[in-house]
Image (tube, helix red, strand yellow):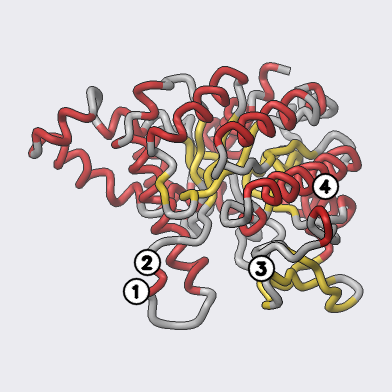
């Protein structure tokens, strides 16, 4: 993982005005190539300029999202990082670029292109970016090959995956070989919501997918990791969940009670859900100081990571200030601001 080494250590002296590590930041390339052979591929993205500083991602001839050039311009990101007290960003694909729903070979080409775009920004970032790449998880063998490439060749610290893969929960045993390889390589896994379940139950405009659908799907994904036995099989796996773990902190007491009440649940889990949950990481992106304190109580002081969803509009604009508002203890603030992320990303190892 040599590509992550430059500037990643030695940057956290006491009193550093810019020391946070943001593990939840996205990249959209400035443009996309045509699919191999030039034939149309359903789900393949393109970019249409909106103005000098913005572009619209188009998928299947429909506008998906208008984004700023901070998605692909390193200098823009660095300016905002300096303003908000962030030393390092972990860059990952915009989730719609996972390509799980695209034909397999085309999906492989897409994620490789996006990962190479992330690597280019990391290279321009003066040591202040690390990479979390995408993989085509609809094909485990191809996903493992790309995992090896991004870790071994591009020097990424890990991988970002979706909360489900075409409707299949990530805790499903079919994905265990991929997670086993991530554990073996020491690669961090960051789980982000994508195409969430239950959209037919939401009443209102499209942004409710991000506001309500995302945390629901992330919560179910975290639960599947526990009920599917992943953490029992791979206890050294470093896995984090976006959006504060979504609804999982609220689901956990019910899961714990069910573990005691239903023999069927007790049979599939040799360790209580609460104990397993304290081996998960979650980010701090909950927009509320009380909820942030609750995450620390549920998951533990060493398991909550600063996250913003930069550079999208629906993000935490003052992440360090939010942590300072929520927590009085300076040592605990330091853990959430940067120390926990160093451990999650394996930066203490370089």
Instruction: Please name the residue shown 37% across and 66% down the image.
Output: 198
Give the camera-side residue of 185 and 299. 185
Instruction: Please name the residue shown 80% across and 68% down the image.
Output: 47
Q: Which mark is residue 198?
A: 2
CB atoms of marks 3 and 4 within 8 Å = no
Residue 268 on image: x %, y % = 22, 30
Instruction: Give the image quarter of residue 202.
Output: bottom left
Disc 3: which residue: 313
The Cα–Cα distance between marks 2 and 4, rounded to whole angstroms, is 32 Å
Crowdedness of circle 1 by 10 Å Cα count: few (<14), some, many (20+)?
few
Residue 302 on image: x %, y % = 48, 30
- Element at label 4: helix
- Element at label 1: helix
Which mark's residue is nearer the viewer, 3 or 4?
A: 4
- Element at label 2: loop
Q: Is residue 201 above or below residue 330?
A: below
Disc 1: which residue: 201
- Quadrant assignment for the N terminus: top right
Q: Which mark is residue 117?
A: 4
Q: Is residue 200 left or right of residue 10?
A: left
Sequence-first disc among 1 and 4: 4
- Quadrant assignment for the C terminus: top right
Instruction: Please name the residue shown 56% across and 23% down the image.
Output: 181
Residue 230 seen:
yes
Residue 67 on image: x %, y % = 75, 68
The Cα–Cα distance between marks 1 and 4, rounded to whole angstroms, is 36 Å
Q: Is residue 160 left or right of residue 281?
A: right
CB atoms of marks 2 and 1 within 8 Å = yes
Give the camera-side residue of 159 and 342. 159
């Amino acid at each position: 993982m040599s590509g992550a080494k430059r500037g990643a250590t030695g940057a956290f002296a006491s009193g550093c005005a810019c020391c946070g590590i943001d593990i939840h930041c996205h990249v959209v390339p400035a443009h996309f190539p045509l699919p191999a052979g030039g034939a149309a591929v359903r789900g393949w993205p393109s970019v249409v300029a909106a103005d000098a500083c913005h572009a619209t991602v188009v998928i299947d001839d429909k506008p998906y999202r208008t984004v700023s050039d901070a998605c692909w311009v390193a200098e823009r990101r660095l300016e905002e990082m300096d303003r908000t007290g962030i030393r390092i960003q972990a860059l990952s694909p915009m989730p719609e670029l996972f390509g799980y729903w695209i034909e397999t070979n085309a999906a492989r080409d897409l994620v490789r292109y996006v990962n190479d775009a992330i690597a280019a920004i990391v290279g321009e970032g003066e040591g202040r970016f690390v990479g979390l790449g995408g993989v085509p998880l609809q094909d485990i063998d191809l996903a493992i090959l790309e995992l090896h490439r991004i870790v071994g060749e591009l020097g990424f610290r890990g991988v970002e995956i979706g909360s489900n893969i075409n409707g299949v929960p990530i805790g499903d045993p079919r994905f265990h070989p991929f997670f086993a390889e991530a554990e073996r390589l020491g690669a961090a896994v960051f789980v982000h919501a994508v195409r969430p379940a239950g959209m037919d139950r939401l009443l209102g405009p499209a942004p409710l997918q991000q506001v309500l659908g995302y945390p629901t799907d992330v919560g179910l994904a975290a639960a599947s990791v526990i009920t599917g036995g992943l953490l029992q099989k791979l206890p050294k796996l470093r896995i984090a969940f976006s959006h504060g773990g979504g609804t999982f902190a609220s689901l956990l007491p019910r899961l714990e009670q069910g573990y005691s009440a239903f023999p069927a649940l007790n049979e599939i889990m040799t360790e209580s859900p609460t104990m397993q949950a304290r081996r998960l990481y979650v980010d701090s992106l909950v927009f509320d100081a009380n909820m942030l304190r609750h995450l620390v109580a549920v998951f533990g002081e060493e398991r909550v990571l600063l996250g913003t969803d930069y550079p999208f509009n629906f993000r935490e604009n003052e992440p360090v200030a939010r942590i300072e508002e929520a927590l009085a203890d300076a040592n605990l603030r330091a853990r959430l601001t940067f120390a926990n992320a160093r451990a999650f990303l394996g930066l203490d190892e370089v």
